[in-house]
Amino acid sequence: MTPTRTAPVESPWIRRYQPAPADGVTLVCFPHAGGSATSFHALSRALAGRLDVVAVQYPGRQDRHREPAFEDLDELADAAFNAVVEAVGTDRPLALFGHSMGASVAFEVAARLEQRAGVTPVSLFVSGRRAPSRHRSEDLHRKGDDALLREIRALDGTAQAALDDEDIVRMFLPSLRADYKAIERYRSAPGAAVGCPVVALTGDNDPKTTVEEARAWQEHTTGPFDLRVFGGGHFYVSEQTDAVAEVLATRLGVAGVG
């Protein structure tokens, strides 16, 4: 019987939804603004038996809803980096995957792994997010609740039933606003780059990221770069989960295994 890992070290930051191979690559996933670790449940299932997939749970949501959400992306990245080192460890190859805001968090965590821990991720996957050097004028975090909810509805990444439930909306709005404040105010250091390979993934009809804005991630790595474009909008991953999983598995050398 192949040994498996069933749970990481106890940490409020880390979730594992599937048993994972005892060796091989650990893929650490970072959610979008307003998102939680459970947004990666389907991707984890698609990669079960091939990769050890763990998802980061930011403060301010689900079982951590009583904790204040971070309003500064660099502070969030600092805390997430510490959690990954302590709870996931660096004794096996690490790859990072982040979607939307999570792509920026994953980029900053990858940089911290290289600079502070001397660990180069085997790959950084940045999804549904323009490169740090590409800015848009956005200020949604300063607007009212209705504007934030319209944004979420338009992106079609949250179940309609949840958006129609006042209690659920009341619970997640503070963390959503904090996330938008963090990502809208985020600016990477000039010339910021990682040394690991970077793969940018995007939907061809994403209102938040053009293909060229995604391609600009190549300016932020001194290693190999690739761009993969999928059919769909901002949350194309939910519609193309199996296809995305195969890209990740192929890049990480485990395609067809499991």
Image (cartoon, helix red, strand yellow):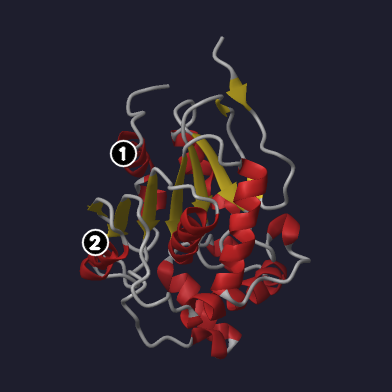
Disc marking residue 251: 1
Q: Name the kind of residue labelled 1 in the image.
A: Arg
Q: Quadrant of residue 207?
A: bottom left
Q: Is residue 120 above or below residue 250?
A: below
Residue pictured at 30% horizontal, 56% vertical: 200
Report the side of 155 relative to 158 (left or right).
Answer: left
Name the kind of residue labelled 2 in the image.
Answer: Asp
Q: CA distance from mark 1 to mark 2?
A: 21 Å
Specify which label sits upstream in the sequence, 1 or 2: 2
Residue hosting label 2: 204
Looking at the picture, tell me which residue is in the foreground, 206 or 22.
Answer: 22
- Residue placed at 25% from the left, 54% from the top? 231
Picture coordinates of residue 197 (x, y %)? 32, 50
Q: Residue furthest right?
A: 66
Secondary structure state at the residue bearing disc 2: loop
Find residue 239 and report its horizontal and vertical position in percent: 37, 49
Q: Nearer the viewer, residue 34 or 232?
A: 34
Disc ID at residue 205: none
Specify few, some or many for label 1: CA neighbours under 10 Å numbering under 14, 14-19, or 20 or more.
some
Q: Nearer the viewer, residue 197 or 239?
A: 197
Pick the quarter of the image with the N terminus: top right
Tell me: residue 49, above or below residue 180.
above
| Residue 122 rendering spot, x and y as whole percentages | 39, 43
Give the side of residue 211 with respect to residue 30, left or right.
left
